[in-house]
Amino acid sequence: MKVYIICWIFLLIICLSQSDLETDECQTTVKITLLSSASINSATDEDDISRTAIVENHSTSSVSRVSIPGEVSGTLFFHEINYIIGGQNESKRRRWRRPTILKSEEQKQILFDVSGTFSGDMNAIMGPTGCGKSSLLDILADRKDPYGTSGCVLVDGVPRHPSYKYTVGYVVQENFFSETLTVRENLFFSANLRLPKTLSRREKIDRVLCVIADLGLESCANTRMGTALLRGVSGGEKKRTCIGMELVLSPKILFLDEPTTGLDASTANNVMQCLKRLAEKGRTIIFSIHQPRYSIFKLFDTVTFMCKGQFVYQGTIDNVVSYFSTLGYHCETHENPTDFVLDILIDASQTPDILAKLKDAYSEPARHSDLKMNAEFENNIPNRGYSECFQHQVSVEAAQSLGREILYVSQRTLRNSLRNPAMALAQVVVSIMMGFLVGFVFYDLKTTTGHGVNNRLGTIFFIIVNQIFSTMTAIEPLLQERALFFHEYASGYYRIRTFFIAKLMCDLLPLRALPSILFSLIAYFMIAATLIIVVLIFAVMMIFSGFLIDLTSVFSWLSWIQWISALRYASNVLPINEFQCLKLCLPNQINVCPMTGEDVLNDQGLSHGTAWDLWKHFFALTMMATTFFLLAYIQLHRIKKTK
């Protein structure tokens, strides 16, 4: 325990000192960088030149990330994309990851032979709810489970690299960030974990500052994001921060899923104006959006309308009204074109004849000749089955070493705990109160027969149950950060074991061990006993602990439960430690001691003749705790982390 506390304090000092150094360097650079707009533009150009590229190592199946110069924009081509869920498309691997009690699952097709091209512009994907916008975006960003997906996706004329999804930016609909960190700290967290090892610390700082300047976040860079109880930055600033956490990669392509969701009209317009500026610098912006106002619609370069998993239009925004006019649909003079088209698509989703009409019109080559497949791209389509384009799996080398990942994630975890100490404080206060309560109720236990023995056994049982139930809060931190973990893992922030080790070191153990130590110290001196407090992880079947019922009287087919009951082992440890070598005297005659602690242990059926009789229970508890931690880690691997 002493070694663990020393290591924990050492890690805390390193994290806090690194945070202060990072803050000082960043603030100094801000003063220099913001002297003129010319310096910002220069820094931005330099940042755009240096980007992450992927180089395949042919000697192994891993992939390394290195920084090389190159253009920022990228052209994305996709051909005959189909996506089916349920039915026979659920592979054995996926069924193991997502078990179901149903014998069969109905098959449903989400996308139907979708083909198109997105280049370095503002590319919008629109359509009614449930038309497949988000599914298409996930597939193009390589965030969708490949099982049930077929077709081909090319980037700049070649098939996507296995680590493609770690080098493109993807801003999901929900905002994912650490609420207790500032805007700048969240950006640095993304940069430190996702940028390649070849970039120096100064280069990472400069890149973060360029992103802050490009997104107009200078005024709120040192403001915390905010929690449900503490006010932080505005909704638009939160969305821009999420965009910035992807832009630190300097990605060729930036995907966004409903970037204006939850924002008012003015804030949504500001966010889209920001994306327009990024597109004008050559970056490819691809996003889904539901029903924007006209001022936002004018910012788009191309728009793709979808209905029931199919394309019904893909082209420039200038041709939208004229295209649908040729089909017999006329837009009023002052009507928003997006409202006009979405009304048509809603009717089409409910009327098969209208949908067939739109589909047939889109299939005519003359109507979308400007988006006809490039011959160079067509020649690069693999001859093998399209589904293989999505099922090619190789291991990808992380951007940082395991040690650095643990350091950065632990640093964030410690900051969260220090800036939002409510849970830790509640654990400590409750433990102190329970310690005093137990101390007052069982104050100065007597070494007498009768009530003395019963009180001592009751104290042991109450302490064990209290400690077991208090550890159940260890599950809460994992549940709170479940969605954040899924997002960060899918984006390539860190390995699974990094998250698990960091939470174990900086959250689960400190918040469980420290309150138990305080409880033990208070109860020990007030009860005047030699109790050993064992911190447990799960409570399993108290009735099989041996305290409430004689285990020999239990049905033989149920008696096996006692061997997986953590409460049983703890209930055996404490009586052996407490009653061994203890003399129990009569209440009024302290010189007459007809019983010994060994007699009580014999009555309880506890072996106590050797040291192993005591330590075997410690060993069993240790093995159970290790097993629970191992199962938790396996579950992090097993659980489905893709959409």
Image (cartoon, grey):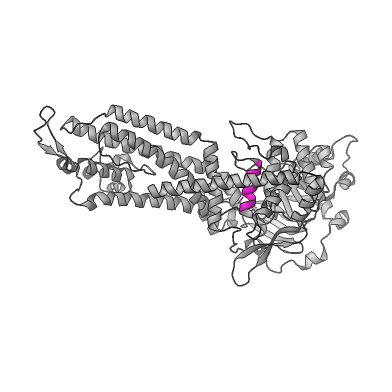
Residue 27 % position (x, y): 68, 43
Measured along the vertical axis of the image, is residue 430 above or below residue 246?
above
Whether 191 is among the magenta residues is yes
Is residue 379 one of those drawn in magenta? no
Image quadrant of residue 594?
Answer: top left
Q: Give the residue displayed 36% in from the left and 42% down from the top.
A: 539
Would residue 371 appear left or right of 55 to someone viewing this image? right
Image location (x, y in percent) of residue 598: 16, 43
Residue lying farthest bottom?
59
Where residue 50 sits, quadrant-wise, is: bottom right
- Residue 313 visible somewhere in the drawing: no
Say if 270 sits above or below 90 in the image: above
Residue 225 visible to the viewer = yes
Above/below status of 556 relative to 50: above
Q: How many marks?
A: 0
Q: Nearer the viewer, residue 531 or 342?
A: 531
Q: Residue 597 at what x, y percent from top left?
A: 17, 40
The answer to whether residue 306 is left or right of residue 178 is right
Q: Main secondary structure of the magenta part?
A: helix
* 382 left or right of 89 in image: right
Specify whether 134 is left or right of 465.
right
Tell me where the magenta segment starts and ends, as one range.
183-192
Of residues 529 and 639, the one nearer the viewer is: 529
Camera-nearest residue between 152 and 42? 42
Residue 72, image x and y in percent?
Answer: 77, 57
